[in-house]
Amino acid sequence: MSDNSADSGSGHCSTPDSDGEVADEIAIVSFERKLDTAEEIKRDLADDYDRIDVLTYHGDVFADHWGEYDCFVGLMASGIAMRKTAGLLDDKWEDPAVVVVDEELTWAIPLTGGHHGANQVAHDLSKLGAVPAMTTASEAAGKQGVESKAKALDSHVVNGDSTVATNLAVLNDELGPVARLDGPKAVLVGDDVTVLKRNGDDGVVLGTGSVSGAKKAQFLTAWERALDDADRDWDDVEFVATGTRKADEPGMLDAAEEIGAGVVYFEKETLSEFEGPTPSRSKELIGWPGIAEASAIAGGRDHELVVEKRRYDDAVTVAVGR
């Protein structure tokens, strides 16, 4: 596949070999009568994107700017956006994503590129009250697709065509955890193996657990203190790691979003392979190893524990791995 690096002239994600998962530059396309609403969207999303432009709709507006943005947000009926962009679509890994939102900001609907920025933008539009209507199979089933795993791991998909098979495996609960291969090594894979390449090598992983209902502020405070102990800061965090039994913890998800980090969920079997040194009551009570340390070790590139488990406010546990 082609190299979408920052110097390639493409308007899409700037990571080499990228799956285009993250939308950084978006255009809001609006009829003149709704430009005030478009400007409202721009203001509310300004902190989340590198660039947001408002374009006044005309018949060739999508064609004129195709390839200039990671995602188009059409403030219009879905039929208009579909008719005007259908003839421009060529390759799901190269095309910009397209989202439509109705004029009353009730629904945000990804039309194309759900795993390549559209779902992300639709989710962000929920800040304005719009309900994100995501139809990609993994999200509809409440599961983490391969592209979402890549984003959470601060990595990108190298061989995009493979995700047809691996996302089907996700739906059938057959994929299992992402296997980590540390080099130098050469690897030979088939068409049904998705290769994820890390975007950086020097970060740390926040392994975390909690009591049910722990608050966003409690997670953030616990994580910040652990990073201080590791002499690291927020920019050093590659991702947050936890166990699958904590997948729906809203405080944790909100805190991870606050710091711009993805969340990776490890199965009990994986965590048992990377059990940390600190005794945990959860093992004797429910058979799970201590989630914070095991997640930090399992997620780290070197499988090393930098900071052992810390407990904050009797609500959140955290460990730092690399």
Image: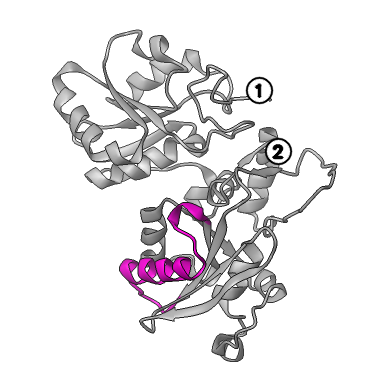
> What kind of residue is marked 1?
Ser
Which mark, residue 237?
Answer: none
The residue depicted at 46 percent of the width and 51 percent of the height is 235
| The C terminus lies in quadrant | bottom right
> What kind of residue is marked 2?
Ser
Determine which residue is flagged by label 2. Answer: 162
| The N terminus lies in quadrant | top right
> CA–CA distance between discs 2 and 1?
15 Å
The correct choice, above or below, for 156 with respect to 59 in the image is below
The residue depicted at 39 percent of the width and 9 percent of the height is 64
The residue depicted at 28 percent of the width and 38 percent of the height is 45
| Total labels drawn | 2
- Which mark's residue is nearer the viewer, 2 or 1? 1
Of residues 86 and 286, which is closer to you in this image? 286
Asked if residue 232 lies in the magenta stretch, the reply is yes
Assess disc 1: are there few (<14), some (14-19) or many (≥20) residues with their C-alpha within 10 Å of its C-alpha.
few
Q: Which residue lies furthest to the front in this view?
A: 231
Determine which residue is flagged by label 1. Answer: 2
Which range is magenta? 210-238
The residue depicted at 65 percent of the width and 58 percent of the height is 173
Asked if residue 115 lies in the magenta stretch, the reply is no
Q: In this view, does 236 lie to the left or right of 26?
A: right
Of residues 285 and 59, which is closer to you in this image? 285
Residue 259: x and y, percent? Answer: 40, 54
Q: Is residue 196 left or right of residue 215?
A: right
